[in-house]
Image: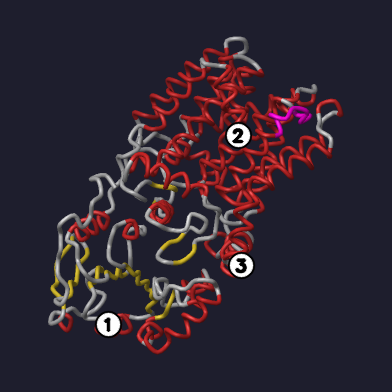
Amino acid sequence: MIVAGRVFHTNLCLIPVFLLAAAVLGIGIERASIAAPLSDPVRQLRAQDESIHVSSSMAMLHGGDWGTPMVMGRPLLFKPPLLQWLTALSLKALGTRLLAVRSPALLFGALAAVLLFQWGRREASPAAGAAAALLLVSNPLWQTFSRLCYTDIPAAFGSVLALFSFGCDSALKRRRTLAGVAAGVAIGVMAKSVAGVLPLLVVVCYTAAAPKHFRASWRRIGVLCLLILFLAGPWHLYAWLKHPKWFWADYVEVQLLGVGLQPSAVHRNPNPLEFYLRRLALTDPVLLTFAAIGVVAAARKAWEGAPAARLVLCWLAVDAAALAVFQARNTPYLLFVAPPLALAGGLFGAPALFGKHTSAAGLLLAAILGLKAINGDTLWGLSFGRAPAIASQQNLRKYCERGRDTELWVIAPDDEFYGITLPLRKIRYVFPDPDGSVAKFIPHYAYLGVTMSASEFLQLKMRQSHYLERLRDWRVSSPAPLGSAILVRSSAELESLLKSRTDVDYYMPPGLVKLEPLAATHVIEEAGNRIFLLSRTATDAPTGACALPGAW
């Protein structure tokens, strides 16, 4: 951020570039509810993680531990909490609204476009910089995630900041270069764990391949690593000391070793690079075309000794290798390669296509941006925040406004965890799990009682002291996490579960169980293609029960 601030200070013309990028990326930022946008438009997957990030940010804001993100009463240590910190601060400054929870990503998305513009201008011309920035802001995925409370855009910005700084001084001779690279890597690490280290690997790759007079000494790289450790290390040490077992289980065993190196059966085909290449071709063929031409041109210039070309190729090679090694196929990971692809397309692809008339590439890309905006319903179009509504979000919002004084159990959920962002008394999720696969996804949740089978939950009173002892051993003293998720193997098991608690409300699809036996204890209300079973012993208290803006 130091380098970014210096760039703005010495180049006031970048302010209009930032404002324009923020305006383009921010259109419709409050149009879709939390988690409603599509994180993978090909598979039509919703942005489910946004609910989790927003919930943990709100917990911090309302008296929680700022060092330990919490969701549904349990620590959330899969990633460092930079996003939650920024979101909580934004909520405090702007109030409870979608603009607040999504503005950190918007800020980082626009700043990345500015740095690409300045990079292209520094190495070639303003037209090349404009082409690179336009390729980035017109990318549908960059557009979508710049309007979401997700970790990917902040982490991708960290890469851009680090390598922009490094490109100014690849020998790392100046202190501000060290500070800029270290800050960029630290931002990436604090947003998305080890993925933030990728620009450091690019620095190492470039240093190993570059001529002596263009590369840093290994001593300077050692100093850089110490600076990164100084910036990103304290939280990791804090989390390790406060919740050692939970940190190891979440951060290392599940997030790094489990999800990253041991993909599930659905993630075995196609191979990772083929998966991402297909996604890129479907969502942004323009970026892919310019980048492909740019890579060829950059390879030619790198052979001739151009430092910028070598750096861009190293950046793409390291990111591609990371995507190939990390086995989880996740479309948002394309956001890490979008900036180097845009830079390759603008800095090398546009001149290769248009020669000295690079400004024509900017005009063409501006026209393509308009075409994408007109065709917002296509995979390659720009939706500007439009997303198909999730009926359960509307149903749960109306339920919240009633101010019910009991728990709500969401059965066979389709709300993308939207319910945990609402001020409900307590919410649990009940998942059908006929083959027992859900319980295996995060094994320590079952051990700690966060995830329970229906039979275990029915015996919770007898087992509670046993689970509380385990939670205390993991440095959690509250019983709040117990039974956050309940797993049922059959309709008979679900029926027994529902009959066991006549004092709670249920939200479920019809047809899972026979409703007649429950009519004596619950009022049945239709809610579109689902139903509420409202406990006759609970009451409504609607006054100010769900003080959230209409767009939430």
Label 3: how many residues lie within 10 Å, few (<14), some (14-19) or many (20+)?
Answer: some
SS for callout 3: helix
Sequence-wise, which precedes: disc 3 or disc 2? Answer: 2
The answer to whether mark 3 and mark 2 are in CB contact below 8 A is no
Identified by mark 1, the residue type is: Glu
Crowd rating for badge 1 (residues with CA inside 10 Å; few <14, some 14–19, many 20+):
some
Q: Amino acid at mark 3?
A: Pro
Question: Range of the magenta residues?
Answer: 170-178
Judge from the rendering whether residue 314 lies leftward or rightward of residue 417; answer left or right: right
Real-space CA distance between mark 3 and mark 1, rounded to the nearest whole angstrom: 39 Å
Quadrant housing the N terminus: top right
| Residue where numbered disc 1 is placed | 495
- The residue under the point 87% across, 29% down is 212
| Residue at the extreme right of the image, as rendered | 212
Q: Nearer the viewer, residue 485 or 424?
A: 424
Under mark 2, the amino acid is Val
Circle 2 is placed at which residue position?
160
Report the residue marked by disc 3. Answer: 244
Q: Position of residue 107 (x, y in %)?
A: 46, 34
Q: Earlier in the sequence, mark 3 or mark 1?
A: 3
Q: CA distance from mark 1 to mark 2?
A: 53 Å
N-terminal label among 1 and 2: 2
